[in-house]
Image: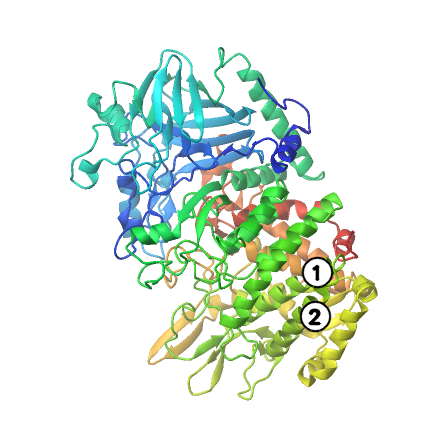
């Protein structure tokens, strides 16, 4: 029996039922990663070399410890029972069960998936989902992709799958996968394979059902089981109960075990003849003894052999459900059509009026990527450490994450990318929630709360960074995201979630204390946070000891802390409207910010300051062991982050909390350094509608910073704000230490430096997350300065814009990265003609990690609809929130 069919509000009703805990609509979703091999969780090597310890070649034969992967896959929310596609074109040496890509050492610019797949659609409860995989009919060029990329240098382009010629003459299959829920645990699956080539071609299509391996580890669970019955595969699990995978017709079913092929991997005997790679060996190599003739096991496939004429298609339907159905197919088409229509209706309510068809396509695919990138993430660090021989009470610094023994991750989480980054990253996730809040505010808030829970947050208050090093330091943007999501919900619904805000505030204050106590070496309110997410943008690797000795006073690190204090101050003032106890904390946070503002503007006895008066820009300062100091004059995001540290509080605070105003005034009078700052450079002022601005600069410095940022020969690129000034293309910055020269030059595309490993690159490309921080800051500044404050944009153009208009200009440039011109060309796809001209490619959009600083071509991870999902925000924000509305967000809170 189907539920919630029809009606424009069907998906919103499902969301409400799920949020209230009444109906588990989120129980099943796209919770399989695209890659589990090569992850830290699966790494048990002595040296911690995750990529080499568990390879793609081993993945088809070796059972995973902590998770599973698959193509277009789904699972339950604890990833006990999994479903995904396997494919064979009759030519490949292996069954294709997972996406292929290069490891960090194999790629000339780091790790990189080498497949074409697209997340086309998803509702937030996953009542409807659509996925596309492009599968070549020729032998997949695994070895060629590795060999050619390995031989290329950092200055060369990457060698992509399209470059190999396997898509020539359109000899490939478009494999579309659609999921539709007839109920919370009743999943309809339709798979359609289109032969785009000129000749008939055969496709072996193997929808596969299996259990995550949980039974052979210490303290493992009972062994679940799959078995064949008439027209279905039955899946019995002690926690899940019984599920049925219905399939149509007299189709061959193949069974094996999700157990390691020890003979192939380790050269030791197998405990069973039926192992993880058994189905692949049967289909590809004809090994009939590799599958269980008794049709039982823990992994099973339904084997369809499809002979598809040229230009034609073939469709397979399946149904995964808890129900025992006499006729699984009678209402199948009706439910699928209803879910498609409901998805259309849902997104009509998400995408504002005024957007064209191409912009709507962009928003929908960006959000689909966000929703498909939700993943079950499981890691019990104490158990993982014990399996590595580490006593959790005696941390071993030689073993990764040994100080994080308290952490247990067992949740659905938003991932940056399910192949290249199939693990959560703290500051990435904060940006994810801004886009996710457009479609699922409940999930967005739960993700922000998740990393603040006791099983994630370190006892000392640190937020875990990412699995390669939970103890690394990401920029502290969690409070910024909490406040942004809170305000967006309040704007859209007229109601702010105070319980969410208060819960986050309490945990974030603990994290702020960790920062204040750990990252201020000299105790002078100037911070040294390490690389802080900016990878290799600087002269030196900021995560390593400096070759000069001494330390860096970081302009961005200090500005991040200013922003943190500002955001928590704003939250405290908001909460004080209901509970006056927060006034005292607001006062404390104001004082923290004031001291940081003094430090950012102080001229030291060595005449070195984070602000460079001559250049009109903020720089890091190198503090040497002999007490001398040198500014590192690299014009980069390091000097723009202080602009991000901009917050506005409404005039209602003066009326509601006179004691807070009096306390702030008394603090300023009591401290000459603060009073001098306010008197000489009013960074704590009152502006439009009586609003209060908290910033690290006055109006004069703001204009000087913006003149550089909005200069098209420096930061302002055709597709957003570059991470490094283009000035450094002709004038690279160099610094000599002990006869060795260190330097930074503008590189619009991939980096030529492996300073931070992988494909890390902040030396020129455009990154969406920092751009959205800058857009938000400009909107705050407009709320304070009003329409009368204008600047040239672009610098030197004579065109005067107010700061709301500047924010929109940057946002429009970001959005244009993905929009097609009159010739069908999208900047994101670079010079690839296939994406511009081919009707089966031209409407498909990839969301890369970063973008060429001069032409917008996508670079880095190709499916990072984590933070690049912010494209959905840039395309819609200025249609949803007008200039006046943005200022109103700063007015008195609703009680």
Q: Nearer the viewer, residue 625 or 508?
A: 508
Q: Position of residue 443 (x, y in %)?
A: 58, 43
Please indicate whether residue 288 sits to the left or right of residue 679 in the image. Answer: left
Please indicate whether residue 400 sits to the left or right of residue 612 in the image. Answer: left
Q: Residue at x 55, y 61 (%)?
A: 476
Q: Position of residue 866 (x, y in %)?
A: 51, 47
Residue 453 visible (yes or no): yes
Depth check, mark 1 against mark 2: the one in front is 2
* The quadrant where residue 659 appears: bottom right
Question: Disc 2 marks which residue?
Answer: 587
Question: Disc 1 marks which residue?
Answer: 780
Q: Quadrant of the N terminus?
A: top right
Asked if residue 652 is positioned above or below residue 271 in the image, the reply reads: below
* The quadrant where residue 657 appears: bottom right
Residue 193 visible (yes or no): no
Q: Nearer the viewer, residue 783 or 301?
A: 301
Please indicate whether residue 358 sits to the left or right of residue 700 in the image. Answer: left
Q: Position of residue 177 (x, y in %)?
A: 47, 27
């Amino acid at each position: 029996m189907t539920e919630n069919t029809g009606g424009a509000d069907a998906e919103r009703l499902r969301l409400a039922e799920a949020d209230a805990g009444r109906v588990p609509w989120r129980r099943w979703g796209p919770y399989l990663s695209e890659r589990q091999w090569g992850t830290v969780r699966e790494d048990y090597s002595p040296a911690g070399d995750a990529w080499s310890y568990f390879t793609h070649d081993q993945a088809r034969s070796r059972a995973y410890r902590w998770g599973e992967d698959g193509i277009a896959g789904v699972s339950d929310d604890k990833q006990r029972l999994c479903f995904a596609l396997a494919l064979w074109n009759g030519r490949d040496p292996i069954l294709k069960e997972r996406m292929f890509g290069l490891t960090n050492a194999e790629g000339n610019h780091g790790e990189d998936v080498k497949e074409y797949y697209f997340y086309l659609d998803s509702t937030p409860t996953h009542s409807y989902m659509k996925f596309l995989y492009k599968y070549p009919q020729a032998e997949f060029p695994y070895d060629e992709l590795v060999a050619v990329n390995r031989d290329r240098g950092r200055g060369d382009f990457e060698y992509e799958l399209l470059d190999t010629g396997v898509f020539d003459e359109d000899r490939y299959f478009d494999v579309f996968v659609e999921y539709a829920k007839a109920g919370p645990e009743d999943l309809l699956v339709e798979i359609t394979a289109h032969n785009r080539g000129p000749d008939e071609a055969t496709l072996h299509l193997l929808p596969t059902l299996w259990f995550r391996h949980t039974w052979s580890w210490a303290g493992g669970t009972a062994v679940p089981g799959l078995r064949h019955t008439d027209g279905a595969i039955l899946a019995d699990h002690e926690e899940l109960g019984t599920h049925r995978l219905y399939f149509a017709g007299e189709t061959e079913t193949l069974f094996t075990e999700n157990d390691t092929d020890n003979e192939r991997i380790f050269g030791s005997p197998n405990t069973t003849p039926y192992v993880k790679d058994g189905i692949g060996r049967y289909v590809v190599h004809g090994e009939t003894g590799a599958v269980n003739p008794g049709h039982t096991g823990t992994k099973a496939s339904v084997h369809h052999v499809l002979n598809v004429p040229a230009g034609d298609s073939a469709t397979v339907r399946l149904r995964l459900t808890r129900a025992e159905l006499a006729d699984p197919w009678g209402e199948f088409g009706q439910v699928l059509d209803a879910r498609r229509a409901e998805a259309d209706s849902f997104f009509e309510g998400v995408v504002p009026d005024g957007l064209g068809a191409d912009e709507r396509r962009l928003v929908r695919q960006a959000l689909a990527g966000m929703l498909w990138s939700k993943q079950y993430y499981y890691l019990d660090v104490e158990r993982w450490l014990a399996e590595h021989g580490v006593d959790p009470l005696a941390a071993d610094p030689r073993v990764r994450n040994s100080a994080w023994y308290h952490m247990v991750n067992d949740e659905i989480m938003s991932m940056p990318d399910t192949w290249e980054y199939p693990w959560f990253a703290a500051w990435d996730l904060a940006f994810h929630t801004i886009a996710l809040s457009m479609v699922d505010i409940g999930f967005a808030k739960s993700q922000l709360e998740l990393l603040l829970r006791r099983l994630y947050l370190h006892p000392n208050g640190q937020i875990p960074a990412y699995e390669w090093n939970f103890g690394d330091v990401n920029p502290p943007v969690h409070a910024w995201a909490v406040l942004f999501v809170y305000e967006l919900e309040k704007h859209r619904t007229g109601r702010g979630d105070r319980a969410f805000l208060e819960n986050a505030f309490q945990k974030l204050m603990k994290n702020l204390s960790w920062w204040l106590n750990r990252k201020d070496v000299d105790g002078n309110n100037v911070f040294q946070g390490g690389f802080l997410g900016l990878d290799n943008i600087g002269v030196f690797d900021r995560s390593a000891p400096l070759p000069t000795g001494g330390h860096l006073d970081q302009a961005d690190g200090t500005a991040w802390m200013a922003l943190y204090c500002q955001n928590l101050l704003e939250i405290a003032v908001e909460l004080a409207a209901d509970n006056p106890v927060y006034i005292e904390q607001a006062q404390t946070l104001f004082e923290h910010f004031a001291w940081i503002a003094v430090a950012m503007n102080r001229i030291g006895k060595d005449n070195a300051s984070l602000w460079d008066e001559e250049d009109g820009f903020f720089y890091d300062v190198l503090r040497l062991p002999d007490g001398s100091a040198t500014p590192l004059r690299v014009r980069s995001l390091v000097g723009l982050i202080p602009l991000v540290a901009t917050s506005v509080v409404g005039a209602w605070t003066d009326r509601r909390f006179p004691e807070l105003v009096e306390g702030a005034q008394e603090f300023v009078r009591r401290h000459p350094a603060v009073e001098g700052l306010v008197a000489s450079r009013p960074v704590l002022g009152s502006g439009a509608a009586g609003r209060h601005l908290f910033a690290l600069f006055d109006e004069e410095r703001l204009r000087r910073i913006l003149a550089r940022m909005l200069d098209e020969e420096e930061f302002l690129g055709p597709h957003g704000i570059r991470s490094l000034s283009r000035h450094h293309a002709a004038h690279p910055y160099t610094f000599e230490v002990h006869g060795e020269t260190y330097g930074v030059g503008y590189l619009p595309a991939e980096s030529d430096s492996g300073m931070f490993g992988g494909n890390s690159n902040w030396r020129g490309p455009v990154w969406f997350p920092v751009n959205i921080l800058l857009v938000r800051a400009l909107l705050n500044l407009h709320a304070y300065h009003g329409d009368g404050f204008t600047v040239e944009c672009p610098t030197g153009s004579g065109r005067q814009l107010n700061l709301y208009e500047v924010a929109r200009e940057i946002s429009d440039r970001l959005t244009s990265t993905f929009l097609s011109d009159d010739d069908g060309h999208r900047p994101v796809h670079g010079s690839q003609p296939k994406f511009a001209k081919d009707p089966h490619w031209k409407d498909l959009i990839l969301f890369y990690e970063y973008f060429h600083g001069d032409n917008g071509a996508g670079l880095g991870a190709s499916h990072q609809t984590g933070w690049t999902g912010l494209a959905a925000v840039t395309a819609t924000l200025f249609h949803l929130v007008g200039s006046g509305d943005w200022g109103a967000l700063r007015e008195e809170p609703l009680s």
